[in-house]
Amino acid sequence: MKASFVTLVAVALLGGTSCVLAASSVDLTVKGSITPSACVPNLTQGGTVDYGKIPARDLSVDTPTEFAPATLQLSIDCEAPTLFALNAKDNRFGSSLFPTLTWYYGLGYASGNQKLGSYSLDLLNPVSDSAVFPIHSFDQGQSWSKFAGGMMRHTYWNSFSDTPGTGGPYFPKALRTVTADLQIITFVAPAKDLPLREEVPLDGSASLDLLYL
């Protein structure tokens, strides 16, 4: 290794003063922060909405069938007042009946490529130590806005503000605890598009990631 290094230097010197050695580099940054408190999210019913056995005859033949809303309770408990957001991710991404509408999540596929349906998630009726309201961010927390209901798009962050009205600006509020209704509205694909000679299980799955701000 040392002999090779000496040879390289000798070749450089033979070029005289006109030889310029170009240096290339790239920077690496490692960032993060250690939060003094942690938060734990929880969903009632183990986070499961079970519609049981759905008779095929109850499905609309030509249009999606809408089911009655189901509601789970979401609770978030922190060790101290903490700034956080929720980011919902569709674990069956691409299987929604309404692919251009980012507030719908997919119910998986039947027979490989037949979409089973869609469902939406809404954060409603949040309760904390003081009045709070759902807000969301489409730019990863750079700005926040209020919206009707509490629709959880899988490309947005969701949080809670104590600013009422519609004027803004809105900012997440540091909370120790908050509970909210998570309303799920489900649509099943038209019967004509489903392989109904066999039992078809609905396969919706989403993750609610808690992010510290």
Image (spheres, rainbow, N blue to C red):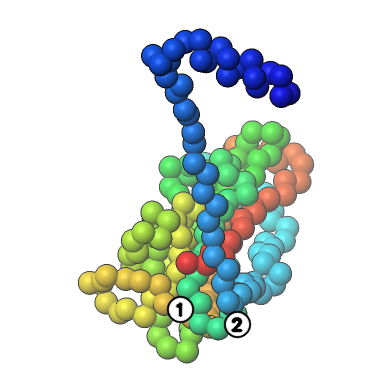
Label 2 crowding class (10 Å Cα cut-off): few <14, some 14-19, many 20+? few
Residue 80: percent from left, percent from top = 55, 83
Q: Residue at x 72, y 46 (%)?
A: 200
- Which amino acid type is shown beneath numbered disc 2? Glu
Instruction: Kindly indicate whether the residue at mark 2 contacts the one at mark 1 (C-beta within 8 angstroms).
Output: no
Residue located at (43% from left, 47% from top): 101
Residue 161, quarter of the rendered image: bottom left
The quadrant of the image that shows the N terminus is top right
Nearest the camera: 47 or 196?
A: 47
Q: Compared with residue 135, is residue 75 higher up or lower down, i.e. above or below? A: below
- Secondary structure, mark 2, is strand
Residue 14: image location, x then y, percent: 51, 10
Query: What residue is pinned by disc 1?
Result: 174
Is 26 on the left-hand or right-hand side of 167? right
Where residue 99 appears, as percent x and y from the top left, is 48, 42
At which x and y percent is residue 58?
Answer: 62, 54
Q: Amino acid at mark 1?
A: Ala
The image quadrant that residue 139 belongs to is: bottom left
Q: Is residue 92 above or below residue 213?
A: above
Q: Which residue is mark 2?
A: 79
**Closer to the camera, 13 or 31?**
13
Residue 109 occupies which quadrant of the picture?
top right
Question: Which circle's residue, 1 or 2, is located before the other in the chain?
Answer: 2
What residue appears at the point 71 percent right and 24 percent down from the top-left corner?
2
